[in-house]
Image (cartoon, rainbow, N blue to C red):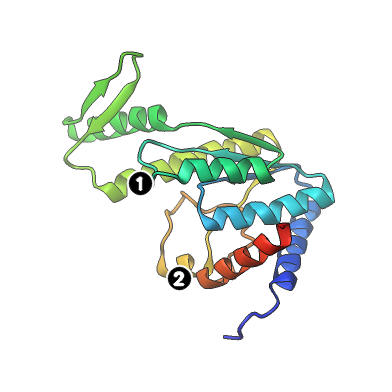
Amino acid sequence: MKEITDYGKVFETLVQKTRDYLVGNNLSAMVLGISGGIDSTVVAAICREVSDRTGIPLIGRSLPSKYNKKGETTTADLVGKAFCNDYKVFNINELYHSCIMQITHKETGSTKYTVGDNGNIESVENTFQTPIANGNIQARLRMIYLYNLASIHKGLVMDTDNLTENNLGYFTIHGDVGDFNPIGGLWKTEVFELAKWLIDHYK
């Protein structure tokens, strides 16, 4: 594997390839799920550059649940406000709890849930559910949201998986995989190096 030495050239190539795909397919928007992680942050920077050159807006959404790690939502807000033309936060707690209650109770009949003062479901317990299964449901609900948003705006959903994750299988099938992936050919270590270059670039 040849070592990358010019990340400015890498960035320009990724911007141009993304631009060519959008313009070539007459797409009107880029929709990006922003997690607060490095991958979605780097993709947001690429998409913003594409937006500046084409006028095609970057629509960013943070879709947290109460299971997000501390600090992730704060970072997602910073990224969304810095790079997106349209940025909003939609908490998927209620959607997730309603979904898991329905699909697990129908199959097992053993789901327990609590309802808050506002009438919304606040927690769901089912002994048959694993943490991985619960995480996959949340990833797929986020993708439903993003794909519907892309349909509304005649756009596409941006993928944020890197080459390391693809090779390891570290993704959710029909979950966190999008339509077009600018960083799909970069190893995780290269994503970190590109992020370092972007810090200097945006200074």
Left or right: 83 in relation to 89: right
Q: Distance between the residues labelled 1 and 2?
A: 20 Å
Instruction: Give the label on residue 167, or none.
Output: 2
Left or right: 126 in relation to 90: left
Crowdedness near tag 1: few (<14), some (14–19) or many (≥20) residues, C-alpha within 10 Å: some
Residue type at the position of mark 1 = Gly
Q: Assign a secondary structure to mark 1.
A: helix
Q: In this view, does 18 lie above or below 147?
A: below
Q: Earlier in the sequence, mark 1 or mark 2?
A: 1
Crowdedness near tag 2: few (<14), some (14–19) or many (≥20) residues, C-alpha within 10 Å: few
Which image quarter: residue 107? Answer: top left
Instruction: Give the label on residue 195, or none.
Output: none
Q: How far from the left and from the top, in percent, is residue 183?
A: 61, 64
Q: Mark 1 points at which residue?
A: 135
Q: Assign a secondary structure to mark 2.
A: helix
> On the rendered image, what quadrant is the C terminus found in?
bottom right
The residue closer to the viewer here, 151 or 164, is: 164
Residue at the location (18% across, 35% down)? Answer: 108
Which image quarter: residue 182? Answer: bottom right
Query: In this figure, what is the number of numbered marks?
Result: 2
Q: How far from the left and from the top, in percent, is residue 59?
A: 66, 40
Residue at the location (35% across, 19% down)? Answer: 120
Q: Is residue 25 at all visible to an observer of this figure?
A: no
> On the rendered image, what quadrant is the N terminus found in?
bottom right
Residue at the location (20% across, 36% down)? Answer: 126
Residue type at the position of mark 2 = Asn
Left or right: 45 in relation to 50: left
Q: How far from the left and from the top, in percent, is residue 68?
A: 39, 43
